Image: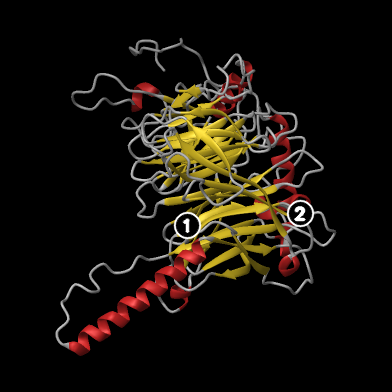
Amino acid sequence: MPDDLPAVVKWGKQRFTGVRLRCPGAWKGALPDSGVLGEVLALKPGQTALTIMLVGAADEAPAAPAEPTTFTEDLTPAEAEAAGAAAEAAAMAAAEGMITALPSERAESVGAPMSSLPVKYSFLVHGLAQDQIEESLRRRRGSQGGALLDVCAMTLGHELGKAYVNAIATLADGTLASGLDNGRIALWRHGRRVKEAVHASPSALLGGRPEPVTCLVALPRGCSRGADLASGSEGSVRLWAAGECVGTIVAPPGTAPACMAALPAAAAGAGPSSGPCLAVAFHQARPFDPAAFRLVPQGEEQRRRRAEALAAQAAQAAAFERVAASVTVASLRAESPGAVQPSVSVLGLAGGAARVTAFGCLPRAPPAADGLVCGTADGALRVWVRTGGGGDDAVWRCEEHLALRFGGGAAATIACVEPLTAQLGLLAVSCLHDEGGGAGEGVEPHGSGASLLRVPLPAHGGAVAILDVARSAVLATLDAHTDVVRCMCALPDGGLATGGGPQDRSVRVWARSQWEDQPREERGGDAVPVRREATQTLSAPGYVFALAALPDANPGGSKLFALACARYNTVRICL
């Protein structure tokens, strides 16, 4: 470059050797070594400056890696599986907490600033970045009691989809299962949908649409053919193992499962042949057509046919009520390798004619066996225990019979029950106040032998009663929702999460200290404490259809949990 050529150099003038100079618009390609800049430099009309790019490297060449790079395409299937397992184990060891439904990938750069923008992991999954999830778990571990932060960490599902999520369940290995009203079942693990299956109903086998999945329940270990999940839809209950159907329980004609509960092998009975079992209550799937008899019969023959049709409908309605007032119990013990269909027996509720509305497995202190809790529409609670045998040979005995009544004798309909697994023998019961019912004072409800429990009248139509079943006592009532509690979830720390109905649209978290038993003189003799303020009111979930706890699966982690909430067509995971 001639000295008299005017130039502005950003860092200074320097002579370069072995490099190339490029300047788009001034010359084509690289300036040759013999070229003189003043001879080739040409400014276009109206242009006052040019940008000259130095193409080359002033630093030393990077050192070759010590180990050769291996690409995924070059691995065999076995090597790829082993590498994935090793990466998952390393991520679990380094993670603050390992909640199986959340992503397990670690951030690439430690100490990098956390992203404040949501991450779209896939078409069906979006939420916080992994470093934000780690920071949220770290904050919870550092806080006193590890309370939820009311943060939606991840959303699973298609937000613009037409199908709603009716039920969710946490499997034994931490996998989250969701059942939709289009008959599909999705399994979620590490922020990915690892499996999708369809609960094919009898109508779907004939070309119709799959019926909605009405309920899901996680099965205990040791079930036949490795079954880990049970789903209920109109016409059948299906058993699943890793997303594959391994068994079917046929429902009575015209019915669909309304609620289900599973008992583990050790709790199902005392005999050596006993094993895991599944209890199902079937209700009428479709209501009768209210316009079936809208026309006035003309003539004696039409009146006769109308009377026959009305009698047939009444008989069918009575048959549906008998089915709804009974419990179908299926033995899921592992038998011969080729056995697919479980052994099914029907348990009748002696002394009760109301339909079963809720189920639960009630853990009890050894040597007492865990019980099957059945709640009915007339406010009765029965605890059934299997004393021996399995399948058709099972012998069930009703050990506890409780009857819930609101103050003044008003009827209490049981909406749902949730055993508090961290406190043996305690049961949370959501009661609906039926203003039009009531047995009245002095009337013995639910047949003979029932222990009557008085529950304070709720302020907004429903409340949650915490019961000590063995002592037949009401420890406290939780009355903070403005609508009936439709779903509940026992938390690993001993607390309880409750979700209100559409008029309430909130999820509240209660601490176990709010119903811990107190001396009679401190709580006013026989008065039942009423708690109207929850420990937390979560705003992130909103109105939910179902709740499930996601425990921490990392032995060296924070021992915390997340809360999965089914909200319309997605599942929100809150930390």
Left or right position of 105 against 377: right
- Residue type of the residue flagged with mark 2: Ala
Q: In terms of secondary structure, where does tag 2 sit?
A: helix
Q: Are marks 2 and 1 in contact (CB under 8 Å)?
A: no
Left or right position of 178 against 264: left
Residue 196, given in percent of the width and then of the height, sits at: 53, 58
Residue denoted by label 1: 214
Residue denoted by label 2: 265
Q: Does 88 appear above or below 310?
A: above
The quarter holding residue 18 reads top right
Kindly give the residue lying farthest to the right in the view shown: 272
Residue 111 seen in the current view:
no
Q: Nearer the viewer, mark 2 or mark 1?
A: 2
Image mark for residue 17: none
- Residue type of the residue flagged with mark 1: Thr
Front one among 98 and 148: 148
Front one among 194 and 297: 297
Marks 2/1: CA–CA distance: 25 Å
Q: Residue at x 43, y 34 (%)?
A: 541
Total numbered labels placed on residues in the image:
2
Left or right position of 574 against 242: left
In what quadrant of the picture does the N terminus appear?
Answer: top left
Kindly give the residue lying farthest to the bottom in the view shown: 301
Sequence-wise, which precedes: disc 2 or disc 1? 1
Q: Residue at x 36, y 23 (%)?
A: 51
Q: Residue at x 54, y 56 (%)?
A: 352
Q: In terms of secondary structure, where does tag 1 sit?
A: strand
Front one among 366 and 139: 366
Q: Does 530 appear above or below 397?
A: above
Front one among 321 and 17: 321
Residue 309, given in percent of the width and then of the height, sits at: 31, 80
